Structures are given as structure tokens and as C-alpha cells.
């Protein structure tokens, strides 16, 4: 488990994670998917069609990056806000 969840806002803490030439410490993004094995997909705020992708459709094209060592490469800026599911809403009614 990475400690991150979908919707969390994160900041990159290292330059060039996984040798990506465009991502630098201080860049920000939003967690969009948690992958098996602990990697996470982040939709970066910046756009670059050469070095960033869409994280298998979870991020906008040219904004996605998979962080394979998120605990070493990212810090939490702000936790995801609670978004009730349909099941939660049924319990409340």
C-alpha cells in the first residue's frame, strides 16, 4: 500500500523520476489510479506530449505518469475529498 488514494493532490520530490526528462521536483498532480505492486498513476498539471501519456486512459493525454516508487518520489499536498458512492447515499436515505 502506498498511503495515497485516488483524488489526492501530490507534489514531486525528486527531479526526473524513472529518468523522465520533463518531471521536476515541485511539479504537482492528482492521483488517478493505484496499480498492483504499489505504483500509482498521476495526472500531472503540466502537459508534454513527448514525455507524458494518459496512464491507460486514467489521465488526460500528455499529462499522465506512473510513479513506481511513490513513497520516495511524491509527497501528499492535500487528501482527496470524500465523494459518497451510490451505496453510501442509499444508506443515508
Image (cartoon, rainbow, N blue to C red):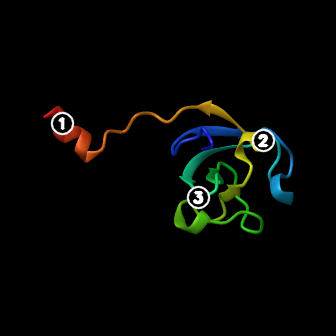
Question: What mark, if any, has residue 36 been given in the picture?
Answer: 3
Alpha carbon distance from label 2 to label 1: 38 Å
Horizontal arrangement in the rendering, residue 59 relative to residue 18 (left or right):
left
Q: How many labels does the image show?
A: 3
Tag 3's secondary structure? loop
Tag 1's secondary structure? helix
Tell me, yes or no, whether the two marked residues, 2 and 1, touch with CB atoms within 8 Å.
no
Residue at point 66% right, 54% down?
39
Tag 2's secondary structure? helix
Question: What mark, if any, has residue 91 been given in the picture?
Answer: 1
Residue 65 vs 91, above or below: the answer is below
| Residue at the disc numbered 2 | 72
Q: Position of residue 55 (x, y in %)?
A: 61, 64
Mark 2 Cα-neighbour bin, 10 Å: few <14, some 14–19, many ≥20 = few
Question: What mark, if any, has residue 20 been given in the picture?
Answer: none
Residue 21 visible in the shown view:
no
Quarter holding the C terminus is top left
Q: Where is residue 9 in the image (x, y as percent from the top left)?
A: 60, 38
Q: Where is residue 65 in the image (x, y as percent from the top left)?
A: 69, 58
Viewer-side residue, 25 vs 69: 69
Amino acid at each position: 500500500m502506498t498511503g495515497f488514494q485516488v483524488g489526492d493532490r501530490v507534489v514531486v520530490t525528486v527531479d526526473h523520476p524513472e529518468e523522465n526528462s520533463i518531471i521536476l521536483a515541485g511539479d504537482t498532480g492528482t492521483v488517478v489510479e493505484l496499480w498492483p505492486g504499489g505504483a500509482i498513476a498521476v495526472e500531472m498539471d503540466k502537459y508534454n506530449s513527448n514525455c507524458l501519456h494518459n496512464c491507460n486512459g486514467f489521465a488526460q493525454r500528455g499529462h499522465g505518469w506512473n510513479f513506481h516508487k511513490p513513497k520516495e518520489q511524491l509527497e501528499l499536498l492535500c487528501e482527496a475529498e470524500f465523494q459518497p458512492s451510490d451505496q453510501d447515499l442509499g444508506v443515508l436515505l
